[in-house]
Image (cartoon, rainbow, N blue to C red):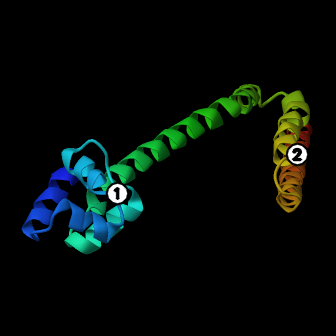
Amino acid sequence: MEIGKTIRSKREELKMTQQQLADQIYVTRQTISKWELGKSEPDAISKKSLEKVLAVQFVEASSSKKEKEEDFLRKIKWFLGLVVFGIAFLPLRVLWVMIRRNWKQPWNRFALLPAVLAFSLWYLHSLKDNVFYLFLALIMIAYFSTSAYFFSDQRAIGEN
């Protein structure tokens, strides 16, 4: 049911005139008439006053509509964020695929991989300093440990 029809039916049920209702809500009789005819809608403060005087609930219909709109906007923002994230990290994914294809070649492990890591660190530097230094330490430890592993693996292959 529309707000205007609800206002009119409840007002008539309570045997009030438009002027009596207007006096209790602190608006003009013409404003009540416009609300009842659907030419305008009461603002939030007037709605609360109407709810108290008429003992009805208007918020549910408008709030559910508002919630749906907010949910829809939230989904759009999430989707756009996902698209931007995917596009922003596309070069990193392409580089990673190139590295994986040519993993056996030493220049990939010792030149291209640090370049990818440097690019990642450059991005991480835009974050808070503590987060950057934490990731820098973790990435350096991971890089040097994998480099040492592959270097020792190359030596073992060369000795056999």
Pointer 1: what residue?
A: 63
- Observer-side mark, 2 or 1, equals 1
Which amino acid, mark 1? Ser
Which amino acid, mark 2? Ser
Pointer 2: what residue?
A: 147
Q: Is residue 124 left or right of residue 63?
A: right
Image mark for residue 146: none
Rendered residue at 86%/55% (across/down): 132
- Report helix, strand or loop for mark 1: helix
Residue 77: image location, x then y, percent: 53, 41
Rendered image quadrant of residue 129: bottom right
Q: Residues within 10 Å of mark 1 (few under 14, many from 20)?
A: few
Q: Tell me if residue 54 can be seen.
A: yes
Q: Is residue 138 above or below residue 15?
A: above
**Between 54 and 137, the one nearer to me in the picture:** 54
Rendered residue at 26%/61% (across/down): 58
**Between 10 and 24, the one nearer to me in the picture:** 24
